[in-house]
Amino acid sequence: MNWNLWIRQSHRWLSILFTMTVIANFAARAVDAAEPSPWITYSPLPPLFLMLLTGLYLFAQPYLAKRQDNTSS
């Protein structure tokens, strides 16, 4: 599997993981009126940060491809 496909696939799985942690966060708040533990509260942040990095890479891909096409012509 090449590098671009690997990043795209990891971005997809990170989005699933992020969604699950957000759902767990809401569920923990719905079950108990008290503030949930910090590890539940902050658990969506690591996947969100990784999604930011992979998303920026995926966003830049078309622009980088155009730049390479223009320089090779």
Image: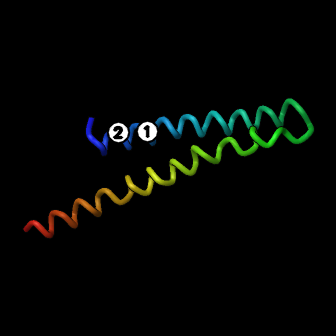
Q: Label 2, secondary structure: give it.
A: helix
Percent x, y for residue 24? Answer: 71, 33
Quadrant in the picture for the C terminus = bottom left
* Marks 1 and 2 in Cβ contact (< 8 Å): yes
Q: How many numbered marks does the figure carry? A: 2
Q: Residue at x 77, y 32 (%)?
A: 27
- Identify the residue under disc 1: 10
The image quadrant that residue 69 belongs to is bottom left
| Whole-number angstrom distance, CA of label 1 to CA of label 2 | 6 Å
Q: What secondary structure is marked by label 1? A: helix
Toward the left, the furthest residue is 73
- In the shown orientation, is residue 64 left or right of residue 12? left
Dot label at residue 26: none
Q: Quadrant of the N terminus?
A: top left
Q: Residue at x 23, y 59 (%)?
A: 65
Look at label 2 and name its amino acid: Trp
> Could you say which is closer to the camera, residue 20 or residue 43?
43
Q: For mark 2, does the 10 Å Cα neighbourhood hold few (<14), some (14 to 19), or many (20 or more) residues?
A: few
Q: Residue at x 72, y 45 (%)?
A: 42
In the image, residue 61 lies at what x, y percent?
31, 56
Question: Which amino acid does the dot numbered 1 rest on?
Answer: Ser
- Judged from this view, the residue extending furthest toward the right is 34
What is the x, y in percent for residue 44?
Answer: 65, 43
Residue 28 x, y percent position in the rendering: 80, 33
In this figure, which residue is indicated by the disc labeled 2? 6
